[in-house]
Image (cartoon, helix red, strand yellow):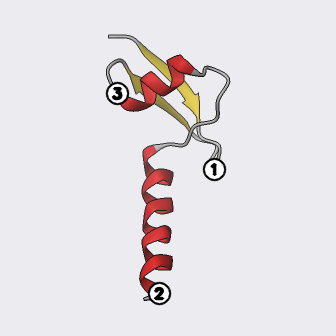
């Protein structure tokens, strides 16, 4: 399997994307793009949910 090592724009940690994943396809379409790791994605999603539920 092919994989690439990327650097998260938020936590600056290195993470890998493997062939067949959504992030791999996004990376292949835009190799100069900025990407975030799964942990940061999860944190962002939780903060967005908290903000949305706080408005209700």
Considering only vertical position in the picture, is 16 above or below 44?
A: above
Q: Nearer the viewer, mark 1 or mark 3?
A: 3
Could you tell me residue 35's position as x and y percent?
Answer: 57, 37
The reply to whether discs 3 and 2 touch (Cβ–Cβ < 8 Å) is: no
Could you tell me residue 19's position as x and y percent?
Answer: 35, 17
Cα distance between the residues tagged 3 and 2: 33 Å
Residue under the image location 50 percent in, 78 percent down? 51
Could you tell me residue 6's position as x and y percent?
Answer: 56, 28
Q: Quadrant of the C terminus?
A: bottom left
Q: How many marks?
A: 3
Q: Which mark is residue 31?
A: none
Give 24 or 37, whichever is nearer the viewer.
Answer: 24
Looking at the rendered structure, the secondary structure element under dot 1 is loop
Q: Pointer 1: what residue?
A: 10
Q: Is residue 13 left or right of residue 19?
A: right
Cα distance between the residues tagged 2 and 1: 24 Å
Residue under the image location 49 percent in, 69 percent down? 48
Q: Nearer the viewer, mark 2 or mark 1?
A: 2
Cα distance between the residues tagged 1 and 3: 20 Å
Q: Earlier in the sequence, mark 1 or mark 3?
A: 1
Looking at the rendered structure, the secondary structure element under dot 3 is loop
Residue under the image location 63 percent in, 50 percent down? 10
Considering only vertical position in the picture, is 33 above or below 51?
A: above
Q: Pointer 2: what residue?
A: 54
Q: Pointer 3: what residue?
A: 21
Circle 1 residues within 10 Å: few <14, some 14–19, many ≥20: few
Looking at the rendered structure, the secondary structure element under dot 2 is helix
Q: Quadrant of the N terminus?
A: top left
Q: Is residue 2 left or right of residue 28?
A: left
């Amino acid at each position: 399997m092919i994989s690439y090592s990327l650097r998260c724009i938020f936590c600056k940690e290195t993470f890998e994307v493997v062939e067949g994943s959504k992030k791999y396809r996004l990376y292949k379409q835009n190799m100069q793009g900025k990407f975030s790791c799964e942990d940061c994605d999860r944190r962002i999603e939780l903060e967005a949910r908290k903000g949305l539920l706080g408005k209700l």
